[in-house]
Image (cartoon, rainbow, N blue to C red):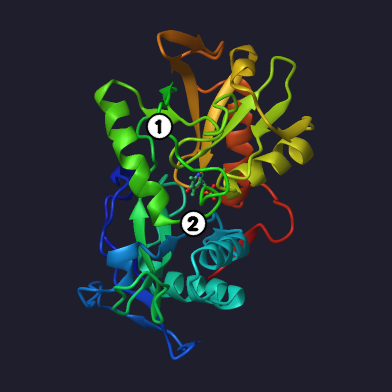
């Protein structure tokens, strides 16, 4: 297999049309066999459920080339389970979990030429998603759906290393109590676009959302969970029913405890505690960990001792261990690294 002739080291984080995608359609109460196709456009009726009532959910994971030349991905079974949870909450049909993992394998294999080489800093971003496809005008779930996976090669999320971010406490809420904050629904993102545009206009990189009921507890940002390091070296990460269960965060909890011997606390985190922490970071598939240097709260600044120049020392250790496992340089727990080719 010959790799595509791309400038791998200088890829941005954007969409590029690769050769193949995986598609399966749900009709008459069942999923068809699914196939790999070349057509990147979708033709739908103007009244399709996805356009009217936003029945859509998605996942995101990456494929990597390891030093010994294999193509692997990271814990795809957890993406399959999380998509099942999203579908159930949105009254969409579940795409069976074992078929989800097989479909990821198939589409990555078909696009092997697009998987960035080891050491380039780039990866293949994999985007599984599901949409309601038949016409729906009365408010109800659709009867027909499409499950699709496309891939696109992406560069490192942060070019030139991860500079600490400045974030602000948002006056908007991301997710209602008992709402859809815990699933990966497109609608959660639609709501976050205005707050993020407004944050950028005001010079902030991201929003910190607090729990909407009491506005006293830390939830997450629009697309990443928080991790904190205490001054005595504990790993603390917020727990709430309206936080999206990040696979990166759940993996970092294991890395902190099992690989770095840290005490791990997954619990409610009061906003008033935050100024006492030593390090803060955002975690998710795209950036792995983005360090946070400063939090702005209505005229008051919380500056972490790790500063605005580089990742805090403990955050850096976590980052190196997790990316080492993902790239096959460090032996990970059973089942974490899933070999595709
Ligand atoms: C996808 C997502 C994350 C990160 O999850 P990972 O599984 O680590 O990629 C965090 N928060 C929100 C709201 C998300 O949608």
* Distance from Cα at disc 1 to Cα at disc 2: 28 Å
Place residue 4 in its image quadrant.
Answer: bottom left
Which residue does the image show at 42% across and 49% down from the upper left?
188
Furthest-top residue in view?
300
Query: Mark 2 CB in 8 Å range of ligand 1?
Result: yes
Q: Is residue 325 left or right of residue 62?
A: right
Q: Is residue 55 left or right of residue 211?
A: left
Query: Mark 1 CB in 8 Å range of ligand 1?
Result: no
Furthest-front residue in view?
138
Task: Give the image location of residue 18, x and y in percent.
Answer: 29, 66
Task: Give the image location of residue 228, x and y in percent.
Answer: 62, 26
Tell me the SS state at disc 1: loop
The reply to whether residue 268 is in sight is: yes
Per the rendering, the mark at residue 4 is none
Position above or below: 97 against 57: below
Per the rendering, the mark at residue 61 is 2
Which residue does the image show at 56% across and 43% down from the upper left?
177
The reply to whether residue 161 is in sight is: no
Return the residue nearer the eye: 187 or 164.
Answer: 187
- The residue that disc 1 covers is 172
């Amino acid at each position: 297999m010959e790799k595509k002739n791309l400038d791998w080291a200088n890829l941005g984080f954007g969409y590029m049309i690769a050769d193949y995608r995986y598609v399966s359609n749900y009709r008459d109460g069942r999923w068809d066999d699914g196939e790999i196709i070349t057509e990147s456009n979708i033709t739908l009726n103007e009244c399709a459920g996805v356009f009217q009532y936003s029945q859509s959910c998605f996942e995101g994971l990456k494929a990597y080339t390891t030093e010994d030349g294999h193509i692997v991905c990271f814990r795809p079974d957890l993406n399959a389970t999380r998509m099942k949870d999203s579908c159930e909450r949105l009254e969409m049909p579940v795409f069976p979990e074992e078929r989800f993992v097989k479909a990821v394998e198939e589409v990555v294999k078909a696009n092997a030429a697009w998987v960035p080489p080891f050491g380039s800093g780039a990866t293949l971003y994999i985007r599984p998603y599901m949409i309601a496809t038949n016409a729906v005008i009365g408010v109800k779930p659709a009867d027909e759906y499409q499950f699709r996976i496309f891939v696109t090669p992406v560069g490192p999320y942060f070019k030139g290393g991860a500079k600490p971010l400045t974030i602000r406490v948002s006056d908007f809420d991301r997710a209602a109590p008992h709402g859809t904050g815990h699933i990966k629904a497109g609608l959660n993102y639609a709501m976050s676009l205005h707050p993020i545009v407004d944050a950028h206009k005001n010079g902030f990189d991201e929003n910190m959302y607090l729990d909407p009921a009491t506005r006293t507890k830390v939830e997450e940002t629009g697309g990443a969970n928080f991790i904190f390091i205490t001054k005595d070296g504990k790993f603390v990460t917020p727990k709430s029913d309206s936080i999206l269960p990040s696979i990166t965060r759940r993996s970092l909890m294991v890395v902190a405890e099992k690989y770095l011997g840290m005490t791990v606390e997954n619990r409610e985190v009061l906003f008033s505690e935050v100024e006492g922490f030593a390090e803060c970071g955002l975690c998710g598939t795209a950036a792995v960990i983005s360090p946070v240097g400063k939090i702005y709260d209505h005229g008051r600044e919380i500056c972490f001792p790790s500063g605005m120049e580089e990742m805090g020392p403990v955050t850096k250790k976590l980052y190196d261990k997790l990316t080492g496992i993902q790239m096959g340089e460090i032996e990970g727990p059973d089942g974490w690294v899933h070999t595709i080719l």
